[in-house]
């Protein structure tokens, strides 16, 4: 009998003498190139995970979660800081739009991305340093940044790493902007903020405090800078527009928060009314509550329409703050020029207005009075044109083009003064985008072309990492698999491979510990809690070497790559049946039509 | 109504028209569509029957036997390895005298694993007391389901309806689907004299001592012998109603024939073309189609072979150690008879090897043109 | 007797096409037989199916070795399969291809070659998916026009009996193919 499995030729039996005694294989089926049957071809495809696309800051969430899973915390935080300089801050105060997009949210509950971000920041070296080698070769250019809030500092961080000399001008005594004066200590401890800012200053970012541009120094003096980034933020509260608004005891929530944050002596009433349903309203209410006041929030619509984040509203209620829904302020009641109460009117919800929310309609004759000794108005902020240079404003925002350039030559703008959501992560994102836009000017790159290359998903996020690799360091290595721009649809996840599991609930300090104290409320995840949620990640669109394709391939056409991560598909044998793609739990593969040539 | 049907669906329609009450079957290539279509017919209420899903062929036949004993007309279908798995219950059905119909698609036994046509699966069950009907085309497949119940219920022996894998099972042909009223006229509702009855309890298939077993077997032999006449009666009646004729041994251009092919199953159809060709060349040749392997119409066989010169038996099967099974049995029937022809037993088309007219012609060439002597076993198409 | 052989890939519907063609001939009063290449059908693997047509009952129960007509559902098969094997001299070849029949003239000389861009027609009528258009009914329209052996109306009758979904779209697509088949000049 012939030796078996010799070569890739079929064994042809030409007479009965050559036939073995029983039906047995005389060759492998290697001669049968079943690849010729194929009209669809599978490929490995790194797609964009929804969390990555869903983070306005373009953080590669799936990437750092995977590194954490593997225990590489320091690498994970470096990857995170490629896009976002302040994980300790966003890990605490970000409203985490990524979690809304998380595929897991369509299965049981989204991965606790935000809590994991904080966990990562809290469990890595507190003396994080920007490495010399991550700073690109000096451009020899100086950039001025007006405002040291999240937008300004983000821009400063990214420009520094792109090889610029950066000077930040801050009006207040200390840098941080809204992070310092707007967000209460119990949500974002000041030492955490200072630690993050120190990372920037120790790497060379110069921050000039008590330098209000336009007052302490002139805008004109910035003309020698290569570019100026305006990120002054919005500090002017919208007025209530009701009688007696100027009475003693009525103040804006923003001003109140600022005073408390800067530890100025401030009187807090015994009975405080907060007007508004946004985050400033919640923060003001919770701060006032910590000073022992009885706090009521009045809001024109219902809780469902409140722009504040659900978690904030919930905590406010937990802490004993009552919310009066469908209540419109009518008049401040004054006695001896001091606030003694507020007259309000009941409302019902009507048709949706231009914001898409149902419009409150006052109910005639439903007016009544509420006794109070302090009113905090928190119905929104607007830009203070007096604090800005002569610049084009449209619809109450600084007018910017796609590359965040303004009507003033070499001036860019970002953060809350431009038309975008007033959130920390959106501010950070605009700072990053401006840094890229400024760098594109220097490197004479077409910003819009660049944007196409560095965009992440379809919701506007961009990647600084890709920008740096492609245009600055020019060391971009194409992965061995396709890098698709497509964001993974949660429906494409093969959930048969996943078990439902509970999302980790973060521990908080008790209610009794909160009164008269500004201790941080959220305690962060414990190690087992963090591990639990790390393992809940589907890793949408990213191969994890789970081996499903390898196991299910009926033709043994899939093999592990000899060196490194991933698989090879032997196209001589792959029939294009698509089982690998169907059984990929995380949509990290695709099928395409075989070329006819 | 004339329609274009595959062999497997022809069975399903035959079952529907026979008003079968209980169906239990397990799918196997090349039988699958029989079961698929029947489950569809049951689901759409075109057939008022209970369709029982089972986990094996053994269970399928067990269900069918239970249903039959309870007084229902019952049906199952299988092929090759599936039939082999039924083997224990194949005995039960025969020796227990269950009047059921089983459709078996002729498929070669493995290993070497094979799904193509070959008769060894059904022929290896020949000693179990079953009537076996071999079919030439899809019309015959459909009609024989109906005829099968008629004779099974008369002689109380199970009927195995046998047809070739793919060549019939998966081939679409024009089939005349009979009218239900005509079928009802031919096949009255099943009325079982011997059945499970709470009013009159009895044990079936219980311990039978040496005192009685022998006689049971003798009676079975008698029943099989009676089946010849029962078949003929049923056939005559069928022809009157439907106009189609399926003799136990069908003659084709035999009148003055010196030479005869003896065939069974779908080979017959192609062999008719060969006979026509040879007739055109002036050879006196005919063909005998063995329709019923059990019971064999021995007297008719002897009558038809008497005085012929040479007979070529085409066996798509092999009883290892003996040779072709049809040849073996036919030779046995002829023992001691006078004026019998020379028998050329050919093995052909095992494991589904295609049988074009040229292969069938080889038998004639060997025996007549080359004028070679017969041997115990002759092989057509063997790779030498 | 006319013998027709279909070449396709597993999953393309060559077997159904052979059955529809048989039904079309049956509708014209012919005797028919159609069957797949007996085997284990696997998606993408080269498969064949056959149709026999005659004025008298079809007795031949074996494979077709010398067909009169060849229908090729996937043009890539012309590279790997000897599609003209055994084809009678002057026999017809119909290929689903966007190329003109002249492109195949050299390879299959001596035969009556026609092509039809069935993929595009199937896409137009939304048969199958964009990547895998289903062309088995479409190509039969072209066969009718190429050979004249069977009427388009009979093909459509076969489609109506056999195709339960998008029936009329299939019929229209077959008609479009009937009108657009490219014959060798």
Image (cartoon, coloured by chain):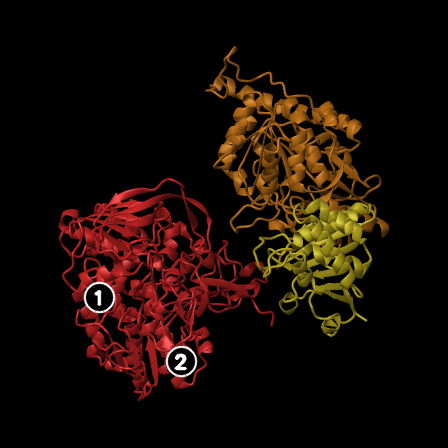
Question: Quadrant of the rendered structure where residue A326 is?
Answer: top left
Examine the rendered structure and indicate whether residue C47 appears above or below residue A197.
above
Hey, which residue is sitting farthest top in the picture?
A: B199
Is residue B312 visible to us here? no
Using the image, determine if residue B216 lies above or below residue A484. Answer: above
Task: Look at chain A in the picture and name its colour.
Answer: red
Residue most extreme to the front: A336
Q: Which residue is located at x 51 percent, y 36 percent?
A: B57
Instruction: Count residues near mark 1 (Cα–Cα under 10 Å), then give few for <14, some for 14-19, many for 20+.
Output: many
Same chain check for tags 1 and 2: yes
**Location of the C terminus of chain C (image quadrant):** bottom right
| Chain appearing in orange on the rendered image | B
Quarter of the view holding residue A549: bottom left
Left or right of residue C39: residue A253: left
Q: A116 and A259: which one is in front? A: A259
> Is A534 on the left-hand or right-hand side of B195?
left
Q: On residue A408, which mark appears?
A: 2
Q: Position of residue A129 (x, y in %)?
A: 21, 75
- Structural distance between the alpha carbons of marks 1 and 2: 29 Å
Q: x, y percentage for residue C146?
A: 79, 61
At x 80% / y 31%, what residue is drawn? B243
Question: Considering only vertical position in the picture, is B49 above or below C42?
Answer: above
- Counting residues from the start of the chain, the first of labels 1 and 2 encountered is 1
Residue A455 on image: x %, y %: 42, 70
Q: Nearer the viewer, residue A295 or C175?
A: A295
Q: Which mark is residue B16?
A: none
* Closest to the observer, A473 or C105: A473
Chain letter belonging to callout 2: A
Q: Mark 1 points at which residue?
A: A180
């Amino acid at each position: 009998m012939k030796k078996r499995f010799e070569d890739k030729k079929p064994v042809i039996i030409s007479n009965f003498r050559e036939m073995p005694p029983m039906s047995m294989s005389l060759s492998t089926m290697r001669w049968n190139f079943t690849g010729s049957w194929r009209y669809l071809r599978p490929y490995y495809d790194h797609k964009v995970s929804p969390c990555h696309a869903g983070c306005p800051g373009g953080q590669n969430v799936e990437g750092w979660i995977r590194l954490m899973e593997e225990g590489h915390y320091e690498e994970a935080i470096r990857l995170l800081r490629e896009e976002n300089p302040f994980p300790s801050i966003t890990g605490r105060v970000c409203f985490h739009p990524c979690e809304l997009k998380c595929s897991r949210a369509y299965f049981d509950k989204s991965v606790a991305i935000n809590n994991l971000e904080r966990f990562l920041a809290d469990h890595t070296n507190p003396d994080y340093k920007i490495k010399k080698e991550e700073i690109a070769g000096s451009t020899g250019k100086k950039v001025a940044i007006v405002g040291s809030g999240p937008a300004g500092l983000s821009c400063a961080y990214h420009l520094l790493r792109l090889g610029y000399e950066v000077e930040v001008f801050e009006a207040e005594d200390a840098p941080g902007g809204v992070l310092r004066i707007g967000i209460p200590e119990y949500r974002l401890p000041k030492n955490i903020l200072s630690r993050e800012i120190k990372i920037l200053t120790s790497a060379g970012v110069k921050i000039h405090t008590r330098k209000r541009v336009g007052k302490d120094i002139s805008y004109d003096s910035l003309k020698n800078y290569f570019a100026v980034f305006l990120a002054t933020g919005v500090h002017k509260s919208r007025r209530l527009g009701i009688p007696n608004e100027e009475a003693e005891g009525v103040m804006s929530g923003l001003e109140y928060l600022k005073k408390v944050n800067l530890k100025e002596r401030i009187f807090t009433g015994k009975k405080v009314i907060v007007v508004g349903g946004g985050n400033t309203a919640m923060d003001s209410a919770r701060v006032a509550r910590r000073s022992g006041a009885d706090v009521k929030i009045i809001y024109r619509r219902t809780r469902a329409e409140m722009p504040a984040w659900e978690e904030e509203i919930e905590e406010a209620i937990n802490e004993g703050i009552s919310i009066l829904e469908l209540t419109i302020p009518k008049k401040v009641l004054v006695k001896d020029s001091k606030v003694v109460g507020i007259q309000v009117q009941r409302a019902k919800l009507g048709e949706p207005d231009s914001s898409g929310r149902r419009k409150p309609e006052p109910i005639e004759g439903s007016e009544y009075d509420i006794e109070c000794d302090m009113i905090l108005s928190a119905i929104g902020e607007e830009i203070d044109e007096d604090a800005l240079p002569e610049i084009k404003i449209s619809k109450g925002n600084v007018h910017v083009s796609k590359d965040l350039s303004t009507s003033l030559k070499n001036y860019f703008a970002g953060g809350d003064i431009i038309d975008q959501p007033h959130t920390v992560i959106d501010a950070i994102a605009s700072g990053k985008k401006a840094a890229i836009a400024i760098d594109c000017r220097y490197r004479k790159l077409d910003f819009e072309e660049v944007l196409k290359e560095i965009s992440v998903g379809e919701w506007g996020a961009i990647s600084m990492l890709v920008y740096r690799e492609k245009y600055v360091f020019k060391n971009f290595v194409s992965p061995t698999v396709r890098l698709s721009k497509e964001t993974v649809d949660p429906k494409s996840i093969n959930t048969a491979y996943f078990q439902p599991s509970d999302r980790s609930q973060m521990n908080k300090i008790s209610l009794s510990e909160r009164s008269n104290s500004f201790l941080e409320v959220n305690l962060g995840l414990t190690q087992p809690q963090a591990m639990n949620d790390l393992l809940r990640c589907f890793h949408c669109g990213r191969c994890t070497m789970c081996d499903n394709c390898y196991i299910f391939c009926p033709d043994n056409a899939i093999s592990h790559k000899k060196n490194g991560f991933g698989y090879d598909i032997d196209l001589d044998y792959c029939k294009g049946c698509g089982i690998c793609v169907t059984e990929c739990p995380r949509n990290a593969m695709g099928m395409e039509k075989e070329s006819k040539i | 109504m004339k329609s274009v049907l595959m062999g497997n669906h022809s069975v399903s329609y035959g079952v529907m028209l026979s008003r079968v009450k209980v169906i239990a079957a397990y799918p196997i290539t090349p039988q699958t569509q029989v079961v698929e279509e029947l489950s569809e017919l049951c689901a759409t209420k075109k057939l008022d029957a209970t369709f029982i899903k089972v986990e094996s062929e053994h269970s399928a036949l067990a269900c069918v036997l239970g249903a039959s004993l309870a007084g229902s007309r019952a049906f199952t279908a299988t092929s090759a390895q599936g039939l082999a798995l039924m083997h224990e219950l194949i005995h039960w059905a025969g020796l227990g005298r269950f009047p059921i119909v089983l459709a078996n698609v002729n498929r070669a036994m493995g290993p070497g694993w094979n799904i193509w046509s070959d008769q060894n699966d059904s022929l290896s069950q020949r000693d179990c007391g079953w009537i076996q009907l071999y079919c030439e085309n899809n019309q015959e497949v459909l009609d024989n389901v109906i005829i099968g119940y008629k004779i099974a219920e008369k002689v109380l022996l199970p009927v195995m309806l046998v047809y070739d894998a793919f060549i019939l099972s998966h081939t679409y042909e024009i089939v005349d689907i009979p009218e239900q009223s005509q079928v009802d006229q031919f096949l009255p509702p099943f009325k079982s004299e011997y059945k499970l009855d709470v009013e009159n309890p009895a044990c079936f298939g219980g311990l039978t001592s040496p005192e009685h077993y022998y006689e049971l077997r003798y009676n079975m032999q008698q029943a099989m012998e009676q089946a010849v006449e029962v078949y003929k009666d049923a056939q005559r009646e069928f022809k009157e109603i439907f106009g189609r004729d399926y003799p136990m041994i069908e003659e084709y251009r035999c009148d003055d024939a010196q030479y005869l092919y003896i065939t069974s199953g779908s080979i017959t159809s192609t062999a008719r073309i060969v006979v026509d060709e040879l007739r055109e060349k002036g050879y006196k040749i005919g063909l005998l189609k063995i329709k019923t392997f059990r019971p064999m119409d021995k007297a008719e066989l002897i009558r038809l072979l008497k005085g012929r010169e040479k007979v070529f038996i085409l066996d798509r099967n092999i009883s290892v150690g003996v040779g072709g099974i049809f040849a073996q049995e036919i030779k046995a029937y002829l023992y001691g008879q006078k004026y019998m022809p020379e028998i050329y037993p050919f093995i052909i088309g095992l494991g589904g090897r295609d049988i074009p007219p040229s292969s069938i012609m080889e038998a004639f060439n060997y025996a007549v043109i080359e004028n070679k002597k017969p041997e115990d076993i002759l092989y057509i198409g063997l790779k030498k | 007797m006319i013998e027709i052989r279909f070449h396709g890939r597993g999953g393309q519907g060559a077997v159904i096409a052979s059955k529809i063609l048989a039904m079309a001939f049956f509708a014209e009063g012919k005797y028919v037989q159609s069957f797949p290449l007996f085997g284990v059908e696997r998606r993408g693997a080269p498969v064949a199916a056959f149709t026999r047509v005659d004025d008298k009952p079809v007795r031949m129960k074996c494979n077709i070795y010398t067909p009169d007509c060849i229908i090729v559902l996937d043009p890539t098969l012309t590279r790997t399969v000897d599609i003209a094997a055994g084809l009678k001299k002057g026999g017809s070849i119909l290929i689903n291809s966007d190329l003109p029949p002249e492109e195949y003239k050299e390879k299959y000389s001596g035969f009556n070659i026609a092509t039809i861009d069935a993929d595009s027609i199937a896409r137009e009528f939304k048969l199958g998916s964009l990547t895998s258009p289903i062309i088995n009914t479409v190509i039969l329209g072209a066969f009718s026009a190429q050979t004249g052996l069977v009427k388009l109306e009979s093909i459509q009758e076969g489609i109506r009996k056999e195709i339960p979904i998008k029936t009329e779209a299939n019929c229209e697509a077959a008609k479009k193919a009937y009108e657009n088949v490219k014959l060798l000049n």
